[in-house]
Image (cartoon, rainbow, N blue to C red):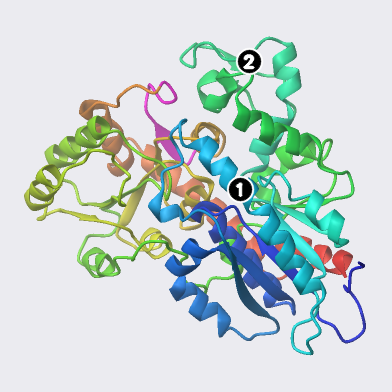
């Protein structure tokens, strides 16, 4: 079968497939909206369970009609809100679930290619998450162009691509993440402290790492590779990545390309917290959230809670279901009552709106890439508490390269952050006695302006996306 892209009278039609977790679904939705606004028809493929949880945004996007349109199709698969895939024992289950999606997705694409519909043209390209093991073979068999969308940083691509060099020099597998050592030879990256490396670098034969590295290594030289970053933020890393992936195209931050889109959420958002924020002083509130997958130990959550209670500074803390295994209502409800005069604990926040609120002075974050970009775009400095995946690297970029955040002394060690150090870092961020907080806010504001310029007409990401669309057509 051939591609219909560019055929007279037919709109380009992209089938879009994210990994079925919220951190991947969200940027894929924003990319879909950006393409739809430029005349594309989008078929957004999601798992049945996640599709049900995303009913609000599905309803909004199905009625969106500027230029193109977004349609939703479902396949069997995992429901992110009902599972925890961060634990080592559950990761094989997640991988098996991704593999099981191959057949249903391929069948859906074949049906779309055979469609005889005046309103919906045949699928003309497949935009997929790079983490699917089969996302290259399927479009090749069908005969349509493939496009990868990388939802993390360019620095992360570069780090994984440098794996053979680091292995040859004996710097990985890492034996001790607390050692005082930096890796200084990766072109495009400033010196990398050992603590900033992903935990999978401790295991030479870790299956999840091996799979990710092999997929990056085997990306065809002529494949499009969209990235959720922008030139002004990661220019050096992007230049170096092009040695491995020549057609990497930064088009982010994706969410700034579609600011009117609702937050993608698998849990009900607590919008009442915005009214509470209206009552707080400007820059006084510490916002705390750890994304859709990362978990905290009960012991760590209790240290944070005790630190907040003793500080008595305004805070907004989102604790999603199952994010603190073993946290019993007998602990949480009395804590909420004791801090109600200055703090608020909710299940899930409308994060972009919260970060843009004038009362927010800092963000205590797990350093997921979406959260980093959203905080940066809002001009809000961060306290970094990385948990999984490449979040240690993101923490390093935030603190050492961009200087828009702080970290703890034992970051990356896996050790408990005790309440005393928690309080010390919070005070350093939220109290401006030494000018550090103001310096970080100034840096964050500059990056916020750069990010917004990048996605506006004439900006680097805007033009990159335009050029990609022209090439695709």
Relative to 354, 376 lies left or right: right
- Count of numbered circles on the image: 2
Residue 260 vertical position relative to residue 434 in the rendered view, above or below: below
What residue lies at 79% left-to-right and 90% top-to-bottom? 118
Name which of mark 1 and mark 2 comes first in the sequence: 1
Q: Nearer the viewer, mark 1 or mark 2?
A: 1
- Residue named by callout 2: 172
- Residue named by callout 1: 98
Say what secondary structure mark 2 lies in. Answer: loop
Residue 227 vertical position relative to residue 237 in the rendered view, above or below: below
Q: What stretch is highlighted in magenta?
A: 403-413
Q: Can residue 458 be seen in this view?
A: no
Q: In which quarter of the image is residue 470?
A: bottom right
Determine the residue located farthest toward the bottom in the rendered image.
Answer: 118
Relative to 62, 429 lies left or right: left
Q: Quadrant of residue 234?
A: top right
């Amino acid at each position: 079968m051939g591609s219909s892209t560019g055929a007279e009278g037919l709109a380009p039609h992209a089938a879009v497939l994210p990994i079925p977790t919220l951190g991947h679904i969200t940027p894929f939705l924003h990319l879909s909206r950006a393409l739809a606004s430029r005349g594309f028809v989008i078929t957004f493929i999601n798992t049945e369970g996640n599709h049900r949880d995303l009913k609000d945004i599905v309803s909004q996007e199905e009625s969106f009609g500027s230029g193109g349109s977004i349609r939703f199709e479902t396949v069997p698969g995992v429901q992110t809100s009902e599972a925890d895939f961060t634990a080592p024992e559950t990761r094989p289950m997640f991988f098996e679930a991704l593999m099981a999606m191959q057949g249903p997705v391929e069948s859906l694409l074949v049906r779309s290619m055979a469609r005889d519909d005046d309103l919906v043209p045949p699928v003309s390209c497949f935009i997929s998450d790079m983490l699917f093991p089969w996302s290259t073979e399927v479009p090749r068999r069908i005969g349509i162009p493939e496009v990868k969308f990388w939802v993390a940083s360019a620095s992360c691509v570069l780090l994984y691509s440098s794996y053979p060099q680091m292995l040859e020099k004996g710097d990985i597998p890492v034996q001790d993440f607390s050692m005082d050592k930096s890796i200084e030879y990766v072109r495009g990256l400033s010196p990398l402290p050992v603590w900033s490396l992903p935990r999978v670098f401790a295991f030479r034969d870790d299956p999840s790492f091996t799979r990710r590295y092999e997929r990056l290594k085997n990306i065809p030289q002529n494949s499009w590779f969209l990235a959720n970053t922008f030139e002004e933020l990661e220019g050096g890393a992007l230049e170096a990545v092009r040695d491995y992936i020549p057609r990497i195209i930064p088009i982010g931050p994706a969410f700034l390309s579609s600011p009117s889109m609702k937050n993608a959420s698998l849990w009900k958002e607590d919008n009442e917290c915005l009214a509470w924020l209206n009552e707080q002083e400007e820059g006084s509130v510490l916002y705390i959230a750890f994304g859709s997958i990362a978990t905290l130990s009960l012991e760590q959550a209790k240290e944070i809670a005790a630190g907040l209670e003793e500080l008595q500074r305004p805070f907004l803390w989102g604790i999603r279901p199952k994010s603190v295994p073993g946290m019993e209502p007998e602990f949480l409800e009395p804590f909420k009552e004791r801090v109600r005069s200055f703090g608020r604990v909710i299940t899930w926040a409308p994060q972009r709106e919260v970060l843009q609120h004038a009362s927010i002075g800092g963000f205590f974050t797990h350093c997921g890439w979406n959260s980093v970009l959203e905080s940066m775009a809002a001009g809000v400095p961060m306290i970094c508490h990385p948990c999984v995946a490449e979040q240690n690297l993101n923490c390093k970029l935030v603190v050492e390269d961009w200087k828009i955040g702080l970290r703890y002394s034992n970051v990356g060690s896996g050790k408990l952050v005790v309440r005393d150090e928690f309080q010390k870092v919070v005070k350093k961020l939220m109290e401006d006695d030494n000018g550090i907080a103001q310096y970080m806010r100034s840096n964050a504001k500059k990056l916020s302006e750069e990010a917004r310029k990048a996605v506006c007409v004439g900006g680097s990401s805007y033009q990159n996306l335009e050029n990609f669309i022209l090439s695709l057509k």
